[in-house]
């Protein structure tokens, strides 16, 4: 019997965290969780990835992760609006991609579109808490 190969787009640690978030009642260590992975599910190889490692994109991902960690740790009433990936923010703040296209419209990318933008995201439109401590 031949099994099709399935490629993991996330790391095993990210999948484990997602699993624990969705099934907090299940007690399983990360090592055991990883051993239960079917043999036909393989991690992406470097040649399968389409990622940019330029300084601008790496710093943007780091800044995004720190912002999401800060919001999660603050336990604000907006915690349900946290994003898992920077691409989620991009897709939320831009118009949907045209049908049959893998890219957003150029007007949306250049932020000249009147129908989308950062101010349209629910995470940025909710009122800010007055009890947030300021950093001096």
Image (cartoon, rainbow, N blue to C red):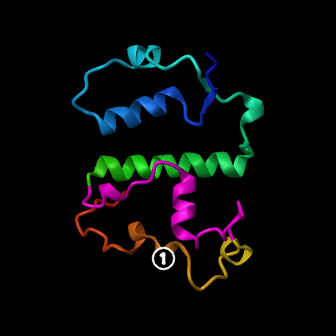
| Residue in the picture at 51% in, 65% down | 92
In the rendered image, residue 18 lying in the magenta stretch gets the answer no
Q: How many marks?
A: 1
Q: Nearer the viewer, residue 99 or 133?
A: 99
Q: Tag 1's secondary structure?
A: helix
Magenta residues span 76-104
Residue 63: percent from left, percent from top: 54, 50
Residue 120: percent from left, percent from top: 47, 76
Residue 80: name its quadrant. bottom left
Residue extending farthest front? 1
Q: Which residue is mark 1?
A: 119
Residue 114: percent from left, percent from top: 59, 86
Q: Nearer the viewer, residue 127 or 86?
A: 86
Q: Is residue 44 above or below residue 124?
A: above
**Quadrant the N terminus occupies:** top right
**Quadrant the C terminus occupies:** bottom left
Q: Is residue 61 above or below residue 133?
A: above
| Direction from residue 105 to residue 123 in the image, left or right | left
| Residue in the picture at 41% in, 29% down | 16
């Amino acid at each position: 019997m031949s099994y099709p190969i399935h490629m993991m787009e996330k790391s095993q640690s990210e999948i484990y965290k997602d699993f624990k978030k969705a099934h907090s009642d299940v007690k399983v260590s990360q090592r055991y969780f990883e051993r239960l992975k079917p043999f036909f599910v393989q991690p992406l190889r470097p040649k399968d990835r389409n990622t940019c490692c330029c300084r601008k994109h790496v710093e943007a991902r780091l800044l995004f992760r720190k912002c999401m960690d800060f919001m999660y740790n603050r336990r604000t009433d907006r915690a349900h609006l946290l994003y898992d990936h920077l691409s989620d923010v991009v897709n939320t703040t831009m118009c949907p991609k045209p049908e049959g296209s893998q890219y957003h419209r150029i007007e949306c990318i250049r932020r000249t579109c009147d129908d989308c933008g950062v101010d349209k995201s629910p995470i940025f439109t909710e009122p800010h808490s007055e009890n947030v401590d300021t950093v001096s």
